[in-house]
C-alpha cells in the first residue's frame, strides 16, 4: 500500500500557492487543492500544478444527485488528478455513479475517497440537525462500509479511526487522515491530533498536513521531517 504525506495547500490565490511550491527545488510533494483555491482560480490551477510534476488530491467533496455527480466526476477525471472525494452522505447510488463518471475510457481512474461525517459534526449536532440517533462512530463505520460497497477506494478519517476503518473495510481500504501535528507543534483549531509517526502506527495511508508545513519558518524542512516521521515511523 502506497503511503505518502499530502500537503494541504490552503491558499486562496495562485501567486501564494506557486510561491510556496517554488520553495521545493528537490522534492515534488503530493498536494491537496481544496475548494478555496479551486473556486478562486478554476481548473487551470490543477493543470498548472500537475504540469509541475506534483500528484494532486482534489478535495471538492461532491454531493448531489447521481447524474450530476457522475458528469462532474468525468470532468475532474479529465483534469488528471490522482485522488478526489465526495460525501458518503450522498448514498450508495451516488457513489456508484461517481465511480462510473471518474473511470476513463482506458479503465483507469483517480483514487476516490469518501468523507464520512465531517469532524466538525459532533454526535449531539448529528442527532439534533440530522436526526441520526446512532452513535457517531457507528455512523462513520457504516458510511465507510457503504463507500466500500459502492467501489470506492477509502475514506477521509481521523488517524484515531483508521484502525477501526481497516478492521471493518479491510487492510486495502485507504485511510486519508488530517489532524496531524508535530509533537512540539501548535494544534491550531484541530482537537484530536496525532503525530506523523503515531498516524502511521495507527493505520493511516496518507496524512494530510497543512499549517505545520505551510506556516513553518522553513516549509521544506518541515515537510522533510514529516515525511521522515511518517514513512519511517521515526519519532
Ligand atoms: O492546517 P491543517 O493541518 O489543520 O490542515 C488540514 C487539512 O485537512 C485542511 O485542508 C482541512 O480542511 C482538511 N480536513 C480536516 N479535517 C477533516 C477533513 C479535512 O482537517 N475532517
Image (spheres, grey):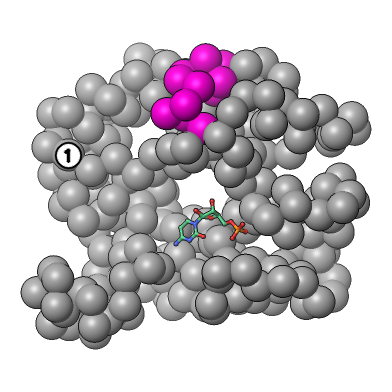
Question: At 47% across and 75% down in the image, what residue appears?
Answer: 161
Please indicate, yes or no, whether residue 146 appears anywhere in the rendered image. Answer: yes
Say above or below: 91 vs 195. Answer: above
Give x and y (percent) for residue 193: 60, 75
Viewer-side residue, 213 vs 86: 213
Q: Is residue 43 magenta?
A: yes
Main secondary structure along the magenta-highlighted residues: helix
Give the image location of residue 105, x and y in percent.
Answer: 35, 15
Within-10-Å neighbours for mark 1: few <14, some 14–19, many 20+: some
In magenta, the rendered stretch is 37-47
The answer to which image quadrant residue 140 occupies is bottom left
Residue 201 percent across, percent down from the top left: 67, 75
Q: Quadrant of the C terminus?
A: bottom right
Residue 151, horizontal then vertical, whole percent: 30, 46
* Residue sitting nearer the eye, 137 or 19: 19
Identity of the residue drawn at 46% across and 19% down: 43
- Of all residues, the one furthest to the left in this rendering is 131
69 is within the stretch colored magenta: no
Q: Secondary structure at mark 1?
A: loop
Compared across the picture, whether 106 is left or right of 141 comes to right
Q: Is residue 194 left or right of residue 77?
A: right
Q: Quadrant of residue 225?
A: bottom right
* 191 lies above or below 152: below
161 horizontally vs 90: left or right: right
Q: Residue at x 38, y 68 (%)?
A: 120
> Label 1 belongs to which residue?
64
Residue nearest the observer in this picture, 99 or 187: 187
Residue 111 appears in the rendering: no
Q: Which residue is located at x 62 percent, y 16 percent?
A: 48
Quarter of the image where one finds residue 22: top right
Q: Is mark 1 within 8 Å of ligand 1?
A: no
Amino acid at each position: 500500500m502506497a503511503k505518502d504525506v499530502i500537503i494541504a495547500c490552503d491558499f486562496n490565490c495562485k501567486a501564494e500557492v506557486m510561491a510556496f511550491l517554488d520553495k521545493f527545488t528537490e522534492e515534488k510533494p503530493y498536494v491537496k487543492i481544496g475548494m478555496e483555491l479551486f473556486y478562486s482560480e478554476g481548473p487551470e490551477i490543477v493543470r498548472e500544478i500537475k504540469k509541475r510534476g506534483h500528484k494532486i488530491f482534489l478535495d471538492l467533496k461532491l454531493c448531489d444527485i447521481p447524474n450530476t455527480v457522475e458528469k462532474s466526476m468525468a470532468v475532474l477525471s479529465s483534469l488528471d488528478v490522482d485522488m478526489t472525494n465526495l460525501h458518503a452522505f450522498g448514498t450508495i447510488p451516488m457513489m456508484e455513479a461517481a465511480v462510473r463518471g471518474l473511470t476513463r475510457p482506458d479503465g483507469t481512474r483517480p483514487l476516490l475517497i469518501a468523507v464520512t461525517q465531517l469532524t466538525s459534526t459532533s454526535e449531539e449536532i448529528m442527532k439534533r440537525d440530522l436526526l441520526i440517533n446512532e452513535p457517531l462512530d457507528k455512523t462513520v463505520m457504516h458510511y465507510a462500509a457503504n463507500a466500500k460497497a459502492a467501489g470506492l477506494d477509502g475514506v477521509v478519517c481521523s488517524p484515531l479511526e483508521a484502525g477501526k476503518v481497516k478492521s471493518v473495510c479491510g487492510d486495502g481500504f485507504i485511510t486519508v487522515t488530517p489532524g496531524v501535528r508535530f509533537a512540539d507543534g501548535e494544534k491550531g483549531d484541530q482537537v484530536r491530533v496525532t503525530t506523523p509517526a503515531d498516524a502511521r502506527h495507527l493505520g493511516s495511508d496518507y496524512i494530510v498536513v497543512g499549517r505545520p508545513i505551510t506556516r513553518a519558518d522553513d516549509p521544506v524542512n518541515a515537510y522533510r521531517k514529516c515525511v521522515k516521521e511518517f514513512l519511517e515511523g521515526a519519532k
